[in-house]
Image (spheres, rainbow, N blue to C red):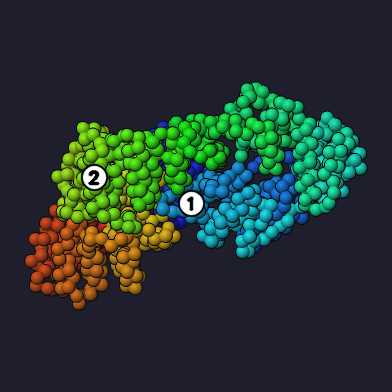
């Protein structure tokens, strides 16, 4: 960006601000009342202007754009606003702040009700200068063990990416600078919280974690700050008086009575607050008498166990003072794991909204329920109080009935969030997500229509929120809860789509077979046929992504079974069978039969399903590309790109196709030498809210075009990110990265670094996946890299060998025009007599590849001293935006200028 400020339009500034809220393109489109395509254009423009690689970086920049001012120092997302004054704890607060200056993991350790959360909130407000890049306050009280990362991601506003753990995405957000993550209430999921903290700190040295817990996390380097009761004869009495005055402004009490009362409550802040809430009706003396009798039953002993009994005693005493209406509502509120609104209370607790509001207000006055004000009022129970209320719910015999109403409320709430997925739905989902997950986790095992509905809705919501692994897990759960075999088949189908989005094709294949099995049980032959055909298509279309190859005999058997199960007169069945047949009846894998491909396209068009049509077109474009018809393949990819606006990006069914369309279009544009189209398509991919932030797949699509246009340094930035991210993801087989690795080797060679060029060349085998014959299709690309580096360095020693290798026949290769052009140019430089006889082949290549056409003119200029040919070459490079090649060609001209 240099020293000059980036100039953005007013609309681009609006888009950038909404990216900072982590909205998808569709959501931004809805907010601004413009088309999704228009939003994509603005995102692409912003990526280019700011010179960043993806949406996540734009979102980070959003905080500094607008009025030009930097973001507020140390803003912690989700930090609760204090409702009351903070009393005491000066020593503990200073100790925590000092520990956070140098330590990376600090734990506030103490019993329930001692005030750990409130101290963490105060510390979070006090350390803004230590953590200029902010962070988040993450409330884990309502969270299950499997959702620690999701809850942190919701607080930070980040999402998951295919084949990248959510923890890595969170670490990237925190890695922008020194950040603080407060993990509150870790004790009920200690192992999960400790694992999460360890992963974040291993991946992100800039992150500091402040935890609150009743037990230490047990990680190396953990600093523990004990939080005990408030000291008597000072802070404990101050707290009681402050809260009593809040309940009754006319409160006046004998200090000795207050001191006695606080001593009986062992200085526990929560117990003191509960007692103070009753002082308005009983007075301090009456409170001491009534509560003293209650606590006397718990007397005996000293230390933490007694303090716990004291707290339990005051909660029990508060419960006994409630009227029956208050007791009933209070125990039923224990069904909620976290915060709830009035509508939820009405549905789950079986009370009218008016009665619920009235009783809630009384419970708030008694400090048994906390009220959180906002656009929508919400309430919650503290963990210690909820535990006691839950016991009362069990004793009442209402647990099963209330829990079922909670499940029904959760299913209805999730369904309402699904329609429509626009506007502020992400905020609404994040608010209730933990509650919805908890409802599903506590649902009885086995088939159940309500649990099934909730799991299905959560699946789609999690997917739209880009929590991909969670979405997959919910789809599996939906299959387990499915009330019918047909519903199970549908759930397994969506699970397969979701796994495919995550590039876990092995799991997607097995899920499709599970869908077929459930459809068979349901007696739905058409659904069975479609599932089997899609399994066969998946293995035939994406064989390099499987860790274990699926034998051709098995795929042929699946196709026969599919044909026998479904009705061939059904358009959808016919289209899926035709597409699977095209991908599995060519001369070898990744060489679809063109005639069958034409039939597949015709059958798919009859369904009007853009995903089906695109998949069938892919068979045709692949057949064209592997037979040397590169411009036809490029044209078919453009046709597939035109189908993208018709696909629902929030539906896993569409997402794998969207991914493949972008990848294929980028590759075909490069293969045809259409560099402007290749860059434009890659920029669109980078702007996509699901694919654009993928740490290595998106980068792999833009690298070839950047190298060919001469943006070598930018290409290398993407390459380093791509490689590091791929390794962090566990090095999955990713054949689509092979070309990017080769082009990175070329970039280093053109920059005069043979050592790094060789290192990247050696990495090709690591990313290619299982050994397969179609890997040889990229052999001409390796020849091109070698020959083009030799042209650049003037290394003519093996010019004849390069020429021979470049013109060796490789079936289904698509980079031959590049290899031919570079090898012939090298041969001309070496004055090999056989160089000229290859010019007709270059003429044919120029008909399929624009880069080869521009290079052909340069070859003619070298061979014949033809100034007009050099001028034509320069014009060709300029049309392609190939600045590096343009500059090298200019050096061949007399005087270095034309």
| Residue 525 visible in the shown view | yes
Asked whether the residues under the numbered discs 1 and 2 touch, taking CB atoms below 8 Å apart as contact, a structural biologist would say no
Rendered view: 320 above or below 155 = above
Where residue 233 appears, as percent x and y from the top left, is 87, 48
- Crowd band around label 1 with a 10 angstrom C-alpha radius: few (<14), some (14–19), many (20+): many
Of pointers 1 and 2, the one earlier in the residue sequence: 1
**Mark 2 lies on residue:** 559
Rendered view: 485 above or below 831 = above
Q: Residue furthest bottom?
A: 797
Quick one: SS at disc 1?
helix
Q: Would residue 534 appear left or right of 237 to someone viewing this image?
A: left
Residue at 80% in and 44% down = 310
Residue at 42% in and 58% down = 729
Quarter where residue 351 is shown:
top right
Where residue 475 appears, as percent x and y from the top left, is 43, 41
Where residue 174 appears, as percent x and y from the top left, is 53, 54
Where residue 583 appears, as percent x and y from the top left, is 22, 48
Residue at 46% in and 53% down = 165
Residue at 18% in and 44% down = 597
Quadrant of the image for the C terminus? Answer: bottom left
| Residue 678 visible in the shown view | no
Quarter where residue 754 is shown:
bottom left
**Mark 1 lies on residue:** 166
- Crowd band around label 2 with a 10 angstrom C-alpha radius: few (<14), some (14–19), many (20+): many
Quadrant of the image for the N terminus? Answer: bottom left
Quick one: SS at disc 2?
helix
């Amino acid at each position: 960006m240099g020293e000059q400020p980036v100039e953005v339009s007013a609309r681009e500034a609006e888009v950038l601000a909404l990216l900072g809220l982590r909205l998808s393109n569709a959501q931004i489109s809805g907010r601004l009342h413009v088309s999704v395509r228009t939003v994509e254009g603005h995102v692409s423009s912003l990526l280019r202007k700011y010179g960043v690689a993806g949406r996540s970086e734009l979102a980070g920049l959003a905080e500094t754009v607008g009025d030009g001012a930097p973001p507020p120092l140390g803003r912690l997302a989700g930090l609760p606003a204090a409702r009351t004054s903070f009393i005491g704890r000066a020593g503990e607060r200073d100790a925590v702040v000092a520990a956070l200056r140098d330590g990376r993991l600090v734990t506030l350790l103490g019993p329930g009700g001692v005030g750990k959360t409130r101290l963490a909130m105060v510390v979070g407000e006090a350390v803004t200068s230590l953590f200029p890049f902010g962070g988040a306050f993450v409330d884990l009280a309502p969270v299950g063990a499997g959702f620690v990362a999701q809850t942190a991601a919701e607080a930070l506003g980040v999402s998951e990416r295919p084949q990248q753990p959510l923890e890595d995405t969170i670490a990237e957000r925190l890695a922008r600078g020194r950040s603080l993550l407060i993990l509150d209430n870790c004790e009920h999921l200690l192992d999960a919280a400790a694992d999460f903290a360890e992963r974040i700190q291993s991946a992100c040295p800039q992150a500091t974690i402040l935890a609150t817990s009743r037990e230490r996390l047990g990680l190396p380097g953990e600093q523990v700050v004990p939080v005990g009761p408030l000291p008597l004869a000072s802070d404990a009495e101050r707290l009681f008086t402050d809260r009593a005055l809040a309940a009754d402004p006319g409160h006046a009490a004998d200090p000795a009575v207050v001191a006695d009362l606080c001593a009986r409550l062992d200085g526990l802040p929560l117990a003191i607050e509960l007692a103070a809430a009753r002082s308005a009706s009983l007075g301090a003396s009456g409170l001491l008498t009534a509560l003293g009798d209650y606590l006397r039953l718990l007397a005996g002993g000293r230390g933490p166990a007694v303090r716990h009994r004291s707290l339990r005693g005051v909660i029990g005493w508060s419960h006994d003072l409630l009227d029956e209406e208050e007791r009933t509502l209070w125990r039923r509120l224990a069904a909620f794991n976290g915060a709830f609104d009035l509508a939820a209370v009405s549905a789950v607790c079986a009370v009218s909204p008016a009665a619920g509001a009235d009783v809630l207000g009384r419970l708030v006055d008694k400090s048994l329920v906390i009220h959180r004000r906002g656009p929508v009022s919400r309430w919650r129970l503290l963990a210690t109080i909820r535990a006691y209320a839950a016991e009362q719910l069990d004793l009442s015999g209402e647990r099963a009935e209330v829990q079922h109403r909670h499940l029904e409320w959760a299913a209805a709430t999730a369904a309402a969030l699904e329609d429509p997925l626009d506007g502020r739905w992400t905020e609404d989902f994040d608010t209730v997500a933990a509650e919805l997950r908890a409802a599903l986790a506590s649902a009885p095992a086995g088939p159940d229509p309500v649990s099934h509905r909730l799991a299905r809705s959560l699946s789609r919501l999690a997917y739209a929120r880009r929590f991909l692994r969670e979405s997959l897990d919910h789809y599996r759960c939906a299959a387990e809860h499915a009330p019918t075999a047909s519903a199970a088949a549908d759930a397994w189908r969506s699970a397969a789509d979701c796994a495919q989005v995550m590039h876990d094709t092995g799991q997607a294949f097995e899920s499709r077979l599970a869908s077929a099995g459930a459809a068979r049980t349901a007696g739905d032959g058409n659904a069975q046929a479609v599932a089997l055909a899609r399994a066969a298509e998946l293995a035939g279309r994406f064989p390099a992504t499987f860790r274990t190859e699926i034998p051709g005999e098995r795929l042929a058997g699946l196709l026969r079974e599919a044909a026998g199960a479904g009705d061939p007169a059904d358009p959808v069945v016919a289209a899926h069978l035709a597409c699977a047949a095209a991908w599995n009846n060519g001369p070898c894998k990744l060489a679809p039969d063109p005639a069958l491909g034409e039939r597949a396209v015709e059958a798919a068009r009859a369904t009007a399903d853009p995903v089906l049509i695109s998949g069938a077109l892919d068979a045709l474009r692949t057949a064209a590309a592997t037979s040397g018809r590169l411009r036809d393949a490029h044209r078919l990819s453009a046709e597939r790109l035109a189908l993208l606006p018709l696909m629902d990006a929030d539906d896993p069914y569409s997402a794998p196709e969207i991914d493949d369309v972008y990848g294929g279009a980028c590759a075909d544009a490069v293969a045809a030498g259409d560099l402007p189209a290749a860059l434009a398509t890659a920029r669109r991919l980078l702007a996509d809210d699901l694919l654009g932030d993928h740490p290595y797949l998106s980068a792999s699509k833009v690298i070839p075009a950047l190298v060919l246009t001469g943006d070598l340094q930018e290409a290398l930035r993407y390459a380093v990110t791509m490689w590091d991210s791929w390794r962090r993801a566990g090095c999955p087989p990713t054949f689509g990265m092979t070309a990017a690795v080769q082009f990175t080797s070329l970039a280093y060679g053109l920059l005069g670094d043979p050592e790094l060029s060789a290192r990247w060349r050696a990495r090709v085998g690591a990313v290619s996946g299982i050994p397969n014959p179609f890997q040889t299709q990229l052999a001409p690309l390796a020849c091109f890299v070698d020959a083009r580096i030799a042209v650049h360095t003037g290394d003519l020693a093996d010019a004849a060998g390069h020429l021979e290798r470049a013109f060796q026949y490789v079936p289904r290769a698509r980079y031959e025009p590049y290899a031919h052009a570079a090898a012939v140019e090298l041969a001309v430089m070496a004055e090999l007599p056989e160089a000229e006889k290859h010019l007709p082949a270059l003429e044919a290549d120029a008909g399929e590849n624009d880069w080869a056409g521009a290079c052909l003119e340069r070859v003619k200029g070298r061979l014949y001293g033809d100034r007009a040919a050099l001028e034509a070459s320069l014009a060709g490079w300029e049309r392609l935006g190939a600045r590096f090649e343009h500059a090298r060609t200019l050096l061949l001209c007399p005087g270095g200028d034309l």
